[in-house]
Amino acid sequence: MKIRFSLLLTLGLAVAGFAAQAQTRMPARKPTAPKEKVVVREGVTMKDGVVMQSGKVLVTQQGLTAPLAQPMSLTNGTKIMADGSVTMADGSSVMLKEGDMLSLSGRLTTAVMKAEQDSLIMAVKNGGGKSKMKVKNKK
């Protein structure tokens, strides 16, 4: 009988110990501010680089766009001035026109090049593009 009583007492104390541990409260979470949303005006690209828009040279870096206030040098040696003149790494000079884009690695994409790419993409989507014509032999 004594063994049964001590076994029940031990079991009861163990259950009480587990129940006491389960009721401890976790510390409250620290409040965190939500991440800032990047708001981009219509027409400004989210890609990092330099774009000429509305007669202004705009620089986008890490999703943030700002007007170019002072000359900027790229990693490959290309230099961009606030008026839109660009001196490429090979020494040639180019003036940015409306819609021209320059990546931060120094690759220039003109508005004409973008229009050509867009028209080719639309032609492929619409089933156009390169197609083979059958020629009938006249005998």
Image (cartoon, helix red, strand yellow):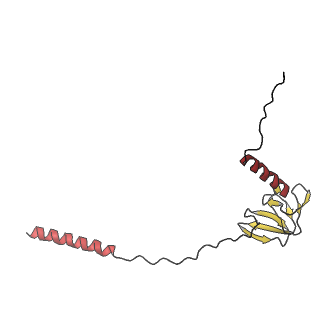
Task: Give the vertical position of 91 relative to 34 (above or below).
Answer: above
Is any part of residue 110 visible from this angle?
no
Identity of the residue furthest to the top in this view: 139
* Residue occupying image coordinates x 84% and y 69%: 54
- The residue lying toward the viewer, choosing from 46 and 130, is 130
**In the picture provided, is 36 more to the left or to the right than 129?**
left
Instruction: Look at the picture and state if 132 lies above or below 73.
Output: above
| Residue 3 in the image, given as x and y percentages of width and height | 11, 68
Q: Residue at x 78, y 31 (%)?
A: 134
Instruction: Locate the N terminus by quadrant.
Output: bottom left
> Which of the pair 76/69 is nearer the observer?
69
Please tell me which residue is depicted at 38% across the width and 77% down the height of the picture. 25
- Image coordinates of residue 52 in percent, x first then y, are 84, 65
Furthest residue toward left: 1
- 137 or 82, which lies in front? 137
Residue 109, quarter of picture: bottom right
In the rendered structure, the answer to whether residue 63 lies left or right of residue 18 reads: right
When the figure is inspected, residue 102 is found, relative to residue 132, above or below; the finding is below
What x and y, as percent, mark residue 72? Answer: 83, 67
- Which residue: 73% across, 44% down? 127
